[in-house]
């Protein structure tokens, strides 16, 4: 049976987002909502960091995500691929 390469084009990729340390509960709720709206699975979220996963076939478009996070008062300071 031939292998369907399109079926394997998506993989789970985890990202570590560096956030401000001074986040309150309402901001964390807004961040979780925003990240899930952008199709991320939120693995860990707290003051100073978020670890999210994406099953997109390509890297996420961080520009609108960073703009939205800044608009809610929680700018992303850095993004790295998590292991």
Image: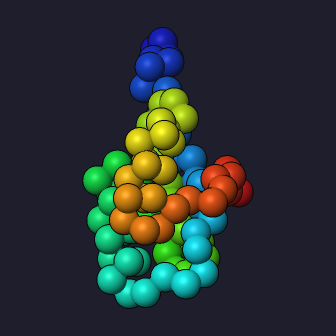
Residue at 49% across, 75% down:
45
Coloration of the structure image? rainbow
Residue at 29% across, 53% down:
37
Up-down relation of residue 10 to residue 32 (above or below): above
Residue at 47% across, 68% down:
74
Nearest to the observer: residue 28 or residue 53: 28
> Splitting the image into 4 quarters, where does residue 42 fall?
bottom left
Nearest to the observer: residue 34 or residue 59: 34
- What x and y, as percent, mark residue 1? 46, 14
Q: How many marks?
A: 0
- What x and y, as percent, mark residue 48? 61, 76
> Splitting the image into 4 quarters, where does residue 36 fall?
bottom left
Up-down relation of residue 58 to residue 67 (above or below): above
- What x and y, as percent, mark residue 34? 33, 59
Most extreme residue toward the top, as rendered? 2
Residue at 41% across, 42% down:
64
- What x and y, as percent, mark residue 9? 49, 27
Q: Quadrant of the C terminus?
A: bottom right
Q: Is residue 60 left or right of residue 68?
A: right
Nearest to the observer: residue 36 or residue 25: 25
Up-down relation of residue 62 to residue 44 (above or below): above
Taking the image as drawn, is residue 74 in sight? Answer: yes
Taking the image as drawn, is residue 43 in sight? Answer: no
């Amino acid at each position: 049976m031939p292998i369907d390469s399109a079926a394997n084009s998506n993989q789970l990729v985890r990202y570590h987002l560096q956030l401000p340390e001074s986040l309150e509960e309402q901001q964390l709720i807004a961040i979780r909502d925003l990240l899930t709206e952008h199709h991320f699975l939120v693995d860990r979220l707290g003051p100073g960091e978020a670890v999210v996963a994406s099953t997109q076939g390509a890297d996420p478009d961080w520009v609108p995500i960073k703009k939205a996070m800044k608009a809610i008062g929680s700018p992303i300071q850095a993004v790295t691929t998590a292991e």
